[in-house]
Image (cartoon, rainbow, N blue to C red):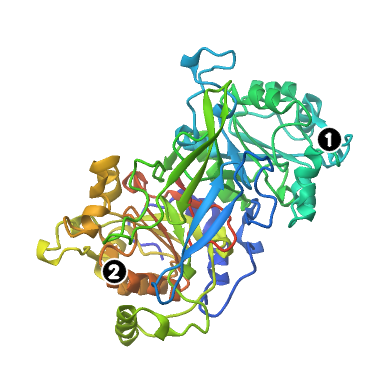
Protein backbone atom coordinates (compact mmCIF):
# COMPACT_ATOMS: atom_id res chain seq x y z
CA UNK A 1 0.00 0.00 0.00
CA UNK A 2 1.09 3.59 -0.60
CA UNK A 3 2.03 5.45 2.61
CA UNK A 4 -0.55 7.94 3.80
CA UNK A 5 -0.04 11.36 2.32
CA UNK A 6 2.50 10.32 -0.31
CA UNK A 7 1.99 12.11 -3.63
CA UNK A 8 1.41 9.79 -6.59
CA UNK A 9 4.05 10.43 -9.25
CA UNK A 10 3.09 10.63 -12.91
CA UNK A 11 4.76 7.37 -13.88
CA UNK A 12 2.87 5.45 -11.18
CA UNK A 13 -0.43 7.03 -12.11
CA UNK A 14 0.05 6.50 -15.83
CA UNK A 15 1.24 2.91 -16.11
CA UNK A 16 0.08 1.10 -13.02
CA UNK A 17 1.95 -1.19 -10.68
CA UNK A 18 2.08 -4.35 -12.79
CA UNK A 19 3.27 -2.69 -16.02
CA UNK A 20 5.81 -0.66 -14.07
CA UNK A 21 7.30 -3.74 -12.51
CA UNK A 22 7.42 -5.51 -15.89
CA UNK A 23 9.54 -2.67 -17.21
CA UNK A 24 11.88 -2.21 -14.29
CA UNK A 25 12.33 -5.71 -12.93
CA UNK A 26 13.11 -7.45 -16.20
CA UNK A 27 16.71 -6.27 -16.17
CA UNK A 28 17.03 -7.15 -12.50
CA UNK A 29 15.91 -10.72 -13.13
CA UNK A 30 18.63 -11.17 -15.74
CA UNK A 31 21.40 -10.29 -13.29
CA UNK A 32 19.88 -11.37 -9.99
CA UNK A 33 22.59 -14.01 -9.57
CA UNK A 34 25.60 -12.28 -11.08
CA UNK A 35 28.07 -14.39 -9.16
CA UNK A 36 26.97 -17.50 -11.04
CA UNK A 37 25.02 -16.31 -14.13
CA UNK A 38 26.38 -14.57 -17.19
CA UNK A 39 23.73 -12.98 -19.43
CA UNK A 40 23.90 -13.00 -23.20
CA UNK A 41 26.37 -10.46 -24.56
CA UNK A 42 24.76 -7.11 -25.11
CA UNK A 43 21.25 -8.50 -24.76
CA UNK A 44 18.25 -6.61 -23.46
CA UNK A 45 15.46 -8.60 -21.90
CA UNK A 46 12.56 -8.66 -24.40
CA UNK A 47 10.06 -7.88 -21.67
CA UNK A 48 11.88 -4.87 -20.29
CA UNK A 49 10.22 -2.32 -22.57
CA UNK A 50 13.67 -0.97 -23.49
CA UNK A 51 15.22 -1.49 -26.92
CA UNK A 52 18.99 -1.12 -27.19
CA UNK A 53 19.76 0.55 -30.53
CA UNK A 54 23.54 0.76 -30.24
CA UNK A 55 26.42 -0.87 -32.05
CA UNK A 56 28.90 -2.91 -30.04
CA UNK A 57 32.34 -1.28 -29.93
CA UNK A 58 35.34 -3.62 -30.09
CA UNK A 59 38.68 -3.74 -31.95
CA UNK A 60 37.48 -6.52 -34.30
CA UNK A 61 34.36 -4.61 -35.36
CA UNK A 62 34.17 -1.77 -37.93
CA UNK A 63 33.40 0.76 -35.20
CA UNK A 64 36.02 3.37 -36.15
CA UNK A 65 35.87 5.47 -39.31
CA UNK A 66 38.45 3.87 -41.64
CA UNK A 67 40.54 6.92 -42.52
CA UNK A 68 44.34 7.00 -42.13
CA UNK A 69 44.12 10.14 -39.97
CA UNK A 70 41.58 8.66 -37.53
CA UNK A 71 42.99 6.72 -34.54
CA UNK A 72 41.58 3.22 -34.17
CA UNK A 73 39.58 2.29 -31.09
CA UNK A 74 41.69 0.58 -28.44
CA UNK A 75 40.98 -0.89 -25.02
CA UNK A 76 43.81 -1.81 -22.66
CA UNK A 77 42.99 -3.81 -19.52
CA UNK A 78 45.73 -2.08 -17.56
CA UNK A 79 44.43 -2.78 -14.05
CA UNK A 80 43.63 -6.39 -13.21
CA UNK A 81 42.43 -8.12 -10.08
CA UNK A 82 45.33 -10.18 -8.73
CA UNK A 83 48.78 -9.63 -7.22
CA UNK A 84 48.83 -5.92 -8.05
CA UNK A 85 45.39 -4.91 -6.84
CA UNK A 86 41.71 -5.53 -6.21
CA UNK A 87 40.12 -3.81 -9.22
CA UNK A 88 39.77 -4.17 -12.96
CA UNK A 89 39.91 -1.06 -15.12
CA UNK A 90 40.74 -0.10 -18.67
CA UNK A 91 42.35 2.61 -20.74
CA UNK A 92 40.10 3.58 -23.62
CA UNK A 93 41.32 5.31 -26.76
CA UNK A 94 38.14 6.33 -28.49
CA UNK A 95 37.37 8.83 -31.23
CA UNK A 96 33.96 10.50 -31.23
CA UNK A 97 33.20 8.96 -34.63
CA UNK A 98 33.15 5.46 -33.13
CA UNK A 99 30.22 3.06 -33.10
CA UNK A 100 26.87 4.69 -32.38
CA UNK A 101 27.70 8.39 -32.29
CA UNK A 102 26.23 11.85 -31.93
CA UNK A 103 26.87 14.76 -34.31
CA UNK A 104 26.29 18.32 -33.08
CA UNK A 105 26.43 21.62 -35.01
CA UNK A 106 30.18 22.47 -34.72
CA UNK A 107 30.84 19.32 -36.76
CA UNK A 108 29.97 21.53 -39.81
CA UNK A 109 29.08 24.98 -38.44
CA UNK A 110 31.93 27.36 -37.69
CA UNK A 111 31.94 29.66 -34.67
CA UNK A 112 30.09 32.91 -35.42
CA UNK A 113 33.00 35.19 -34.48
CA UNK A 114 35.14 33.65 -37.23
CA UNK A 115 32.99 35.21 -39.96
CA UNK A 116 33.39 32.20 -42.25
CA UNK A 117 30.78 31.42 -44.94
CA UNK A 118 29.66 28.47 -42.79
CA UNK A 119 29.68 30.41 -39.50
CA UNK A 120 26.42 30.43 -37.60
CA UNK A 121 24.76 30.92 -34.22
CA UNK A 122 25.11 27.22 -33.35
CA UNK A 123 28.87 27.13 -33.89
CA UNK A 124 29.45 26.92 -30.13
CA UNK A 125 26.92 24.14 -29.47
CA UNK A 126 29.46 21.42 -28.72
CA UNK A 127 28.55 18.14 -27.02
CA UNK A 128 28.77 19.68 -23.55
CA UNK A 129 26.50 22.59 -24.54
CA UNK A 130 23.62 20.75 -26.17
CA UNK A 131 20.48 21.23 -24.03
CA UNK A 132 19.70 17.80 -22.56
CA UNK A 133 16.08 17.81 -23.76
CA UNK A 134 17.38 17.65 -27.33
CA UNK A 135 18.81 14.15 -26.81
CA UNK A 136 15.35 12.58 -26.79
CA UNK A 137 11.87 12.70 -28.21
CA UNK A 138 9.19 10.70 -29.98
CA UNK A 139 10.66 8.17 -32.41
CA UNK A 140 9.27 8.64 -35.92
CA UNK A 141 10.59 5.67 -37.89
CA UNK A 142 10.67 6.17 -41.65
CA UNK A 143 10.88 2.80 -43.44
CA UNK A 144 13.41 3.17 -46.26
CA UNK A 145 14.48 -0.44 -46.72
CA UNK A 146 13.72 -0.19 -50.42
CA UNK A 147 16.68 2.20 -50.75
CA UNK A 148 19.28 -0.16 -49.26
CA UNK A 149 21.73 -1.18 -52.01
CA UNK A 150 19.57 0.64 -54.57
CA UNK A 151 22.36 2.91 -55.82
CA UNK A 152 25.47 2.32 -57.91
CA UNK A 153 28.72 1.24 -56.29
CA UNK A 154 30.26 4.05 -54.27
CA UNK A 155 27.01 6.04 -54.32
CA UNK A 156 24.18 6.48 -51.83
CA UNK A 157 20.51 6.25 -52.61
CA UNK A 158 19.10 9.60 -51.50
CA UNK A 159 16.33 10.06 -48.98
CA UNK A 160 14.31 12.92 -50.41
CA UNK A 161 11.59 15.26 -49.21
CA UNK A 162 9.01 13.05 -50.96
CA UNK A 163 9.85 10.14 -48.65
CA UNK A 164 9.16 12.29 -45.59
CA UNK A 165 5.95 13.71 -47.03
CA UNK A 166 4.73 10.18 -47.80
CA UNK A 167 5.41 9.17 -44.19
CA UNK A 168 3.48 12.21 -42.95
CA UNK A 169 0.48 11.36 -45.12
CA UNK A 170 0.43 7.85 -43.67
CA UNK A 171 1.00 8.79 -40.03
CA UNK A 172 0.84 12.47 -39.03
CA UNK A 173 2.67 15.76 -39.64
CA UNK A 174 6.09 15.99 -38.03
CA UNK A 175 6.51 18.55 -35.25
CA UNK A 176 9.04 19.82 -32.70
CA UNK A 177 10.02 17.14 -30.21
CA UNK A 178 10.05 14.38 -32.84
CA UNK A 179 13.19 12.36 -33.58
CA UNK A 180 13.10 11.22 -37.21
CA UNK A 181 14.84 7.85 -37.60
CA UNK A 182 15.85 6.66 -41.07
CA UNK A 183 15.41 2.87 -41.18
CA UNK A 184 17.09 1.10 -44.09
CA UNK A 185 18.40 -1.94 -42.21
CA UNK A 186 21.96 -1.10 -43.31
CA UNK A 187 23.57 -1.61 -39.89
CA UNK A 188 21.53 -4.76 -39.28
CA UNK A 189 22.91 -6.32 -42.46
CA UNK A 190 26.49 -5.10 -42.60
CA UNK A 191 27.82 -4.42 -39.10
CA UNK A 192 29.84 -7.63 -38.82
CA UNK A 193 33.25 -8.63 -37.43
CA UNK A 194 36.18 -7.81 -39.67
CA UNK A 195 37.11 -8.63 -42.39
CA UNK A 196 33.44 -9.15 -43.37
CA UNK A 197 32.73 -5.85 -41.66
CA UNK A 198 34.56 -3.93 -44.40
CA UNK A 199 31.18 -3.94 -46.14
CA UNK A 200 29.89 -1.55 -43.47
CA UNK A 201 32.03 1.47 -44.45
CA UNK A 202 35.33 0.66 -46.16
CA UNK A 203 34.01 -1.23 -49.19
CA UNK A 204 31.53 1.54 -50.00
CA UNK A 205 34.24 4.21 -49.67
CA UNK A 206 36.43 2.18 -52.03
CA UNK A 207 33.59 2.02 -54.54
CA UNK A 208 33.31 -1.77 -54.33
CA UNK A 209 29.71 -1.79 -53.05
CA UNK A 210 26.73 0.57 -52.96
CA UNK A 211 26.79 3.19 -50.25
CA UNK A 212 24.33 3.64 -47.43
CA UNK A 213 21.02 5.52 -47.88
CA UNK A 214 21.08 9.08 -46.54
CA UNK A 215 19.10 12.33 -46.80
CA UNK A 216 19.75 14.99 -49.41
CA UNK A 217 20.34 18.61 -48.34
CA UNK A 218 16.81 19.48 -49.52
CA UNK A 219 15.40 16.75 -47.28
CA UNK A 220 17.29 18.26 -44.33
CA UNK A 221 15.87 21.69 -45.08
CA UNK A 222 12.35 20.26 -45.16
CA UNK A 223 12.80 18.53 -41.79
CA UNK A 224 14.12 21.75 -40.29
CA UNK A 225 11.03 23.58 -41.60
CA UNK A 226 8.86 21.10 -39.65
CA UNK A 227 10.66 22.01 -36.41
CA UNK A 228 12.54 18.71 -36.18
CA UNK A 229 15.83 19.14 -34.31
CA UNK A 230 16.95 15.54 -33.80
CA UNK A 231 17.50 12.74 -36.28
CA UNK A 232 18.97 9.24 -36.39
CA UNK A 233 20.12 6.89 -39.10
CA UNK A 234 21.12 3.23 -39.22
CA UNK A 235 23.80 4.21 -41.72
CA UNK A 236 27.37 4.73 -40.45
CA UNK A 237 27.14 8.43 -41.36
CA UNK A 238 24.48 11.02 -42.16
CA UNK A 239 26.54 11.85 -45.26
CA UNK A 240 25.58 10.48 -48.69
CA UNK A 241 28.33 9.16 -50.96
CA UNK A 242 30.25 10.25 -52.90
CA UNK A 243 30.09 14.05 -52.49
CA UNK A 244 27.02 15.16 -50.51
CA UNK A 245 28.27 14.36 -47.01
CA UNK A 246 29.25 17.91 -46.07
CA UNK A 247 26.32 19.67 -47.82
CA UNK A 248 23.85 17.35 -46.05
CA UNK A 249 25.57 17.80 -42.69
CA UNK A 250 25.61 21.58 -43.00
CA UNK A 251 22.01 21.74 -44.23
CA UNK A 252 20.80 20.23 -40.97
CA UNK A 253 23.39 21.29 -38.41
CA UNK A 254 23.12 25.01 -39.29
CA UNK A 255 19.58 24.84 -37.87
CA UNK A 256 20.83 23.52 -34.53
CA UNK A 257 20.01 19.88 -35.25
CA UNK A 258 21.73 16.98 -33.53
CA UNK A 259 21.65 13.43 -34.80
CA UNK A 260 22.68 9.87 -34.15
CA UNK A 261 24.71 7.91 -36.67
CA UNK A 262 25.19 4.16 -36.56
CA UNK A 263 21.90 3.14 -34.97
CA UNK A 264 20.91 -0.53 -35.23
CA UNK A 265 17.67 -2.47 -34.69
CA UNK A 266 15.18 0.21 -35.78
CA UNK A 267 12.85 -2.54 -37.02
CA UNK A 268 12.05 -3.27 -33.37
CA UNK A 269 10.28 0.09 -32.98
CA UNK A 270 6.76 1.13 -33.95
CA UNK A 271 6.40 3.89 -36.53
CA UNK A 272 5.44 6.36 -33.80
CA UNK A 273 4.92 6.37 -30.05
CA UNK A 274 8.25 5.12 -28.68
CA UNK A 275 10.53 7.36 -26.65
CA UNK A 276 13.94 7.62 -28.30
CA UNK A 277 17.10 8.87 -26.57
CA UNK A 278 20.81 9.17 -27.33
CA UNK A 279 23.23 9.70 -24.43
CA UNK A 280 27.01 9.94 -24.49
CA UNK A 281 29.97 11.19 -22.43
CA UNK A 282 29.98 14.94 -21.87
CA UNK A 283 33.24 15.78 -23.62
CA UNK A 284 34.12 19.47 -23.44
CA UNK A 285 34.37 21.15 -26.83
CA UNK A 286 33.56 18.01 -28.81
CA UNK A 287 31.89 18.43 -32.24
CA UNK A 288 30.83 14.77 -32.17
CA UNK A 289 30.92 11.97 -29.65
CA UNK A 290 30.45 8.27 -28.99
CA UNK A 291 27.26 7.30 -27.21
CA UNK A 292 24.40 4.91 -26.53
CA UNK A 293 21.03 5.00 -28.33
CA UNK A 294 17.91 3.31 -26.99
CA UNK A 295 14.15 3.47 -27.03
CA UNK A 296 11.43 2.85 -24.45
CA UNK A 297 8.36 1.28 -26.04
CA UNK A 298 6.15 0.76 -22.96
CA UNK A 299 3.40 3.06 -24.18
CA UNK A 300 2.20 4.89 -21.06
CA UNK A 301 5.74 5.49 -19.83
CA UNK A 302 7.03 6.44 -23.29
CA UNK A 303 4.28 9.02 -23.66
CA UNK A 304 5.17 10.62 -20.34
CA UNK A 305 8.89 10.79 -21.20
CA UNK A 306 8.09 12.28 -24.60
CA UNK A 307 5.92 14.91 -22.90
CA UNK A 308 8.76 15.79 -20.50
CA UNK A 309 11.18 16.29 -23.38
CA UNK A 310 8.71 18.39 -25.38
CA UNK A 311 8.34 20.63 -22.33
CA UNK A 312 12.13 20.66 -21.77
CA UNK A 313 11.79 19.22 -18.25
CA UNK A 314 15.18 17.53 -18.10
CA UNK A 315 18.02 17.74 -15.57
CA UNK A 316 21.57 17.03 -16.77
CA UNK A 317 23.31 14.93 -14.09
CA UNK A 318 26.70 14.42 -15.76
CA UNK A 319 30.00 16.16 -15.11
CA UNK A 320 31.93 17.69 -17.99
CA UNK A 321 35.00 15.81 -19.17
CA UNK A 322 38.00 18.08 -19.69
CA UNK A 323 41.75 17.76 -19.00
CA UNK A 324 41.72 20.64 -16.50
CA UNK A 325 38.91 19.12 -14.41
CA UNK A 326 39.27 16.43 -11.69
CA UNK A 327 37.59 13.59 -13.61
CA UNK A 328 39.93 10.66 -12.87
CA UNK A 329 41.02 8.97 -9.65
CA UNK A 330 44.26 10.60 -8.38
CA UNK A 331 45.17 7.85 -5.90
CA UNK A 332 46.51 8.24 -2.38
CA UNK A 333 50.22 7.93 -3.14
CA UNK A 334 52.64 8.56 -5.98
CA UNK A 335 52.01 6.24 -8.91
CA UNK A 336 48.60 5.03 -7.69
CA UNK A 337 46.57 7.30 -9.97
CA UNK A 338 44.28 6.05 -12.72
CA UNK A 339 44.99 6.96 -16.33
CA UNK A 340 44.28 10.68 -16.75
CA UNK A 341 41.78 12.09 -19.21
CA UNK A 342 43.47 13.32 -22.39
CA UNK A 343 42.09 15.09 -25.42
CA UNK A 344 44.34 14.43 -28.41
CA UNK A 345 43.99 16.80 -31.35
CA UNK A 346 44.39 15.51 -34.89
CA UNK A 347 43.24 16.39 -38.40
CA UNK A 348 42.90 20.18 -38.54
CA UNK A 349 39.73 21.33 -40.38
CA UNK A 350 40.44 24.77 -41.97
CA UNK A 351 36.82 25.72 -42.72
CA UNK A 352 36.00 25.23 -39.02
CA UNK A 353 39.34 26.40 -37.56
CA UNK A 354 39.03 23.31 -35.41
CA UNK A 355 40.84 20.06 -34.80
CA UNK A 356 39.06 16.77 -34.62
CA UNK A 357 40.15 15.00 -31.48
CA UNK A 358 40.18 11.61 -29.89
CA UNK A 359 40.23 10.87 -26.17
CA UNK A 360 42.27 8.64 -23.89
CA UNK A 361 40.67 7.99 -20.54
CA UNK A 362 40.21 5.52 -17.73
CA UNK A 363 36.94 3.65 -18.02
CA UNK A 364 35.84 5.20 -14.70
CA UNK A 365 36.43 8.82 -15.79
CA UNK A 366 33.66 11.29 -15.06
CA UNK A 367 30.08 10.04 -14.82
CA UNK A 368 30.32 6.29 -15.31
CA UNK A 369 28.94 2.82 -14.63
CA UNK A 370 30.37 0.39 -12.09
CA UNK A 371 29.65 -3.15 -13.34
CA UNK A 372 30.07 -6.20 -11.07
CA UNK A 373 33.39 -7.26 -12.65
CA UNK A 374 35.02 -4.00 -11.54
CA UNK A 375 35.75 -5.46 -8.10
CA UNK A 376 34.62 -9.08 -8.36
CA UNK A 377 37.12 -11.61 -9.75
CA UNK A 378 36.07 -14.30 -12.26
CA UNK A 379 34.91 -17.75 -11.13
CA UNK A 380 37.79 -19.94 -10.02
CA UNK A 381 39.89 -17.00 -8.82
CA UNK A 382 42.52 -17.92 -6.22
CA UNK A 383 42.06 -15.48 -3.35
CA UNK A 384 45.65 -16.07 -2.25
CA UNK A 385 46.79 -14.18 -5.34
CA UNK A 386 45.48 -10.91 -3.88
CA UNK A 387 48.06 -8.61 -2.25
CA UNK A 388 48.52 -9.57 1.43
CA UNK A 389 46.58 -6.60 2.80
CA UNK A 390 43.63 -7.32 0.48
CA UNK A 391 43.65 -10.95 1.64
CA UNK A 392 43.26 -9.64 5.18
CA UNK A 393 40.43 -7.33 4.14
CA UNK A 394 38.68 -10.21 2.41
CA UNK A 395 38.90 -12.39 5.52
CA UNK A 396 37.31 -9.62 7.59
CA UNK A 397 34.63 -9.01 4.97
CA UNK A 398 33.60 -12.65 4.69
CA UNK A 399 33.48 -13.09 8.47
CA UNK A 400 31.06 -10.19 8.71
CA UNK A 401 29.07 -10.24 5.45
CA UNK A 402 29.41 -13.70 3.94
CA UNK A 403 31.17 -15.02 0.87
CA UNK A 404 32.29 -12.50 -1.69
CA UNK A 405 30.92 -13.39 -5.10
CA UNK A 406 32.55 -13.69 -8.52
CA UNK A 407 31.58 -12.21 -11.86
CA UNK A 408 32.59 -11.77 -15.48
CA UNK A 409 29.81 -9.27 -16.22
CA UNK A 410 31.30 -6.26 -17.96
CA UNK A 411 29.52 -3.09 -19.00
CA UNK A 412 28.07 -4.24 -22.31
CA UNK A 413 26.32 -7.12 -20.53
CA UNK A 414 24.44 -4.89 -18.09
CA UNK A 415 20.90 -4.38 -19.47
CA UNK A 416 19.87 -0.77 -19.90
CA UNK A 417 16.79 -1.55 -17.85
CA UNK A 418 19.14 -1.87 -14.88
CA UNK A 419 20.16 1.81 -15.00
CA UNK A 420 16.78 3.40 -15.68
CA UNK A 421 13.85 3.91 -13.35
CA UNK A 422 12.13 6.21 -10.84
CA UNK A 423 14.68 8.45 -9.14
CA UNK A 424 14.67 8.25 -5.35
CA UNK A 425 16.98 10.98 -4.05
CA UNK A 426 18.17 10.37 -0.49
CA UNK A 427 19.58 13.53 1.08
CA UNK A 428 22.68 12.67 3.14
CA UNK A 429 23.99 16.21 3.63
CA UNK A 430 23.37 15.91 7.35
CA UNK A 431 26.38 13.54 7.48
CA UNK A 432 28.83 16.23 6.36
CA UNK A 433 31.28 17.13 9.10
CA UNK A 434 30.59 13.98 11.10
CA UNK A 435 34.09 12.48 10.78
CA UNK A 436 36.71 13.88 13.17
CA UNK A 437 39.88 15.05 11.45
CA UNK A 438 42.04 12.57 13.40
CA UNK A 439 40.22 9.78 11.47
CA UNK A 440 40.95 11.18 8.02
CA UNK A 441 41.19 9.92 5.34
CA UNK A 442 37.68 8.62 5.87
CA UNK A 443 34.15 9.24 4.64
CA UNK A 444 30.90 9.68 6.56
CA UNK A 445 29.05 6.38 6.44
CA UNK A 446 25.58 6.22 4.91
CA UNK A 447 23.70 3.72 7.08
CA UNK A 448 20.53 1.70 6.99
CA UNK A 449 19.07 4.20 9.46
CA UNK A 450 19.59 7.02 6.94
CA UNK A 451 17.71 5.06 4.28
CA UNK A 452 14.87 4.12 6.63
CA UNK A 453 14.53 7.74 7.68
CA UNK A 454 14.05 8.66 4.04
CA UNK A 455 11.44 5.92 3.61
CA UNK A 456 9.53 7.13 6.66
CA UNK A 457 9.34 10.61 5.14
CA UNK A 458 9.00 9.87 1.41
CA UNK A 459 7.59 6.37 1.13
CA UNK A 460 9.09 2.91 0.91
CA UNK A 461 11.62 2.05 -1.78
CA UNK A 462 10.26 -0.25 -4.47
CA UNK A 463 11.95 -2.80 -6.74
CA UNK A 464 13.34 -1.05 -9.79
CA UNK A 465 13.78 2.35 -8.12
CA UNK A 466 17.12 4.09 -8.73
CA UNK A 467 18.55 5.28 -5.41
CA UNK A 468 20.63 8.45 -5.69
CA UNK A 469 22.63 9.70 -2.70
CA UNK A 470 22.76 13.50 -2.54
CA UNK A 471 25.60 15.02 -0.54
CA UNK A 472 26.34 17.96 -2.84
CA UNK A 473 30.04 17.05 -2.86
CA UNK A 474 30.64 17.17 -6.62
CA UNK A 475 28.70 20.42 -7.25
CA UNK A 476 30.72 22.07 -4.45
CA UNK A 477 34.18 20.83 -5.40
CA UNK A 478 34.22 20.08 -9.13
CA UNK A 479 36.45 22.93 -10.27
CA UNK A 480 39.41 23.27 -12.63
CA UNK A 481 43.08 23.01 -11.78
CA UNK A 482 44.23 23.51 -8.15
CA UNK A 483 40.75 24.32 -6.83
CA UNK A 484 39.60 20.92 -8.02
CA UNK A 485 41.88 19.13 -5.53
CA UNK A 486 39.02 19.50 -3.05
CA UNK A 487 37.03 17.01 -5.13
CA UNK A 488 39.24 13.93 -4.69
CA UNK A 489 42.93 14.64 -3.98
CA UNK A 490 42.48 16.46 -0.67
CA UNK A 491 40.04 13.92 0.85
CA UNK A 492 42.14 10.95 -0.31
CA UNK A 493 45.27 12.48 1.23
CA UNK A 494 43.52 13.13 4.55
CA UNK A 495 43.51 16.92 4.14
CA UNK A 496 39.72 17.12 4.30
CA UNK A 497 36.74 14.92 5.04
CA UNK A 498 35.68 12.45 2.37
CA UNK A 499 32.29 12.41 0.69
CA UNK A 500 29.49 10.30 2.25
CA UNK A 501 29.48 6.68 1.11
CA UNK A 502 27.29 3.64 1.85
CA UNK A 503 28.68 0.66 3.74
CA UNK A 504 27.95 -3.01 2.98
CA UNK A 505 25.02 -2.99 5.41
CA UNK A 506 23.29 -0.22 3.44
CA UNK A 507 23.95 -2.03 0.17
CA UNK A 508 22.51 -5.26 1.58
CA UNK A 509 19.41 -3.42 2.79
CA UNK A 510 18.86 -1.85 -0.63
CA UNK A 511 19.29 -5.24 -2.31
CA UNK A 512 16.60 -6.69 -0.05
CA UNK A 513 14.26 -3.89 -1.19
CA UNK A 514 14.81 -4.87 -4.83
CA UNK A 515 17.12 -1.96 -5.67
CA UNK A 516 19.56 -2.91 -8.44
CA UNK A 517 21.21 0.43 -9.23
CA UNK A 518 22.67 3.00 -6.82
CA UNK A 519 24.08 6.40 -7.77
CA UNK A 520 25.99 9.12 -5.97
CA UNK A 521 27.02 12.73 -6.41
CA UNK A 522 30.35 11.80 -4.88
CA UNK A 523 33.24 10.65 -7.10
CA UNK A 524 32.72 7.07 -5.91
CA UNK A 525 30.31 4.91 -3.95
CA UNK A 526 33.18 3.50 -1.91
CA UNK A 527 34.43 6.69 -0.30
CA UNK A 528 38.07 7.44 0.54
CA UNK A 529 38.99 4.67 3.00
CA UNK A 530 40.40 1.87 0.78
CA UNK A 531 39.28 -1.07 2.91
CA UNK A 532 35.78 0.27 3.40
CA UNK A 533 35.51 1.17 -0.29
CA UNK A 534 36.42 -2.34 -1.42
CA UNK A 535 33.90 -3.85 1.00
CA UNK A 536 31.16 -1.65 -0.51
CA UNK A 537 32.06 -2.72 -4.06
CA UNK A 538 32.19 -6.39 -3.06
CA UNK A 539 28.75 -6.07 -1.48
CA UNK A 540 27.39 -4.26 -4.53
CA UNK A 541 28.64 -6.77 -7.10
CA UNK A 542 27.91 -9.88 -5.05
CA UNK A 543 24.25 -8.86 -4.86
CA UNK A 544 23.97 -8.27 -8.58
CA UNK A 545 23.87 -4.49 -8.29
CA UNK A 546 25.53 -1.77 -10.35
CA UNK A 547 26.56 1.75 -9.51
CA UNK A 548 26.53 5.10 -11.29
CA UNK A 549 29.22 7.37 -9.89
CA UNK A 550 30.28 10.99 -10.25
CA UNK A 551 26.82 12.50 -10.75
CA UNK A 552 26.12 16.18 -10.27
CA UNK A 553 23.04 18.37 -9.68
CA UNK A 554 21.27 15.45 -7.96
CA UNK A 555 19.69 17.96 -5.59
CA UNK A 556 17.79 19.45 -8.56
CA UNK A 557 15.96 16.20 -9.31
CA UNK A 558 12.33 16.64 -8.25
CA UNK A 559 10.15 14.01 -6.62
CA UNK A 560 8.68 11.69 -9.22
CA UNK A 561 11.47 12.14 -11.80
CA UNK A 562 12.65 9.32 -14.04
CA UNK A 563 16.39 8.56 -14.13
CA UNK A 564 18.20 7.51 -17.32
CA UNK A 565 21.83 6.50 -17.57
CA UNK A 566 23.49 4.83 -20.54
CA UNK A 567 27.17 3.88 -20.87
CA UNK A 568 28.97 3.45 -24.18
CA UNK A 569 28.56 -0.15 -25.35
CA UNK A 570 32.17 -1.33 -25.24
CA UNK A 571 32.87 -5.05 -25.20
CA UNK A 572 34.84 -6.21 -22.17
CA UNK A 573 34.85 -2.82 -20.43
CA UNK A 574 35.11 -2.81 -16.62
CA UNK A 575 33.74 0.71 -16.32
CA UNK A 576 31.53 2.69 -18.58
CA UNK A 577 31.71 6.41 -19.36
CA UNK A 578 28.25 7.71 -20.22
CA UNK A 579 25.59 10.30 -19.58
CA UNK A 580 22.90 10.59 -16.91
CA UNK A 581 19.76 12.72 -17.09
CA UNK A 582 16.48 12.90 -15.20
CA UNK A 583 13.10 13.68 -16.79
CA UNK A 584 10.21 15.09 -14.79
Q: Residue 168 at x, y = what percent?
A: 75, 30
Q: Quadrant of residue 408?
A: bottom right
Q: Assign the C terminus to one quadrant of the image.
A: top left
Q: Is residue 557 left or right of residue 146?
A: left
Q: Assign the N terminus to one quadrant of the image.
A: bottom left
Q: Residue 31 at x, y = what percent?
A: 54, 71
Q: Residue 344 at x, y = what percent?
A: 49, 40
Q: Is residue 584 visible?
A: no
Secondary structure found at label 2: helix
Q: Quadrant of residue 503?
A: bottom left
Secondary structure found at label 1: loop
Q: Which mark is residue 154?
A: 1
Q: Is residue 58 visible?
A: yes
Query: Is residue 67 positioned above or below 379 on the image?
Result: above
Q: Is residue 401 left or right of residue 562?
A: left
Q: Mark 2 — residue?
A: 530
What residue sits 65% from the left and 51% below the top?
53
Q: Residues within 10 Å of mark 2 (few under 14, many from 20)?
A: some
What residue sits 46% from the left and 41% below the top?
343
Label 2 – label 1 distance at C-alpha? 56 Å
Closer to the camera, 349 or 446? 349
What residue sits 75% from the left and 43% below the top?
201
Query: Is residue 25 positioned above or below 130 on the image?
Result: below
- Cβ atoms under marks 2 and 1 closer than 8 Å: no
Q: Is residue 182 left or right of residue 367?
A: right
Q: Residue 432 at x, y = what percent?
A: 18, 56
Q: Earlier in the sequence, mark 2 or mark 1?
A: 1
Amino acid sequence: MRPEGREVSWFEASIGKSAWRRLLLAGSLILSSLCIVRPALGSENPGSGIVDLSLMVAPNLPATWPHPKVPNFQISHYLKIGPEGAYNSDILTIDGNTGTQLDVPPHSVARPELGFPNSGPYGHMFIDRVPPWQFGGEACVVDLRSLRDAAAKGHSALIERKHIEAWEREHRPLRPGDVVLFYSGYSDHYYKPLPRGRRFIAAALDGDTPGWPDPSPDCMEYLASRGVRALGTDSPSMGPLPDLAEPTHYAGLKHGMVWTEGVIGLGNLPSTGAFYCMLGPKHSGAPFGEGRAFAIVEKPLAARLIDSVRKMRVVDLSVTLAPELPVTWPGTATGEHRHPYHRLDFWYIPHLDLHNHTHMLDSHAGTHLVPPSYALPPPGFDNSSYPPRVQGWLAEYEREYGTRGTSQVTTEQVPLSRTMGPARVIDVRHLLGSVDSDRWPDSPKITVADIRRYEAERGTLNPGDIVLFHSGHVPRTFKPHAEGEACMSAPLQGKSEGWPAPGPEAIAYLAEKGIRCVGTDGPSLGGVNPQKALATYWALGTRGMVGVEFLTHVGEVPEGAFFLFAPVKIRGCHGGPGRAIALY
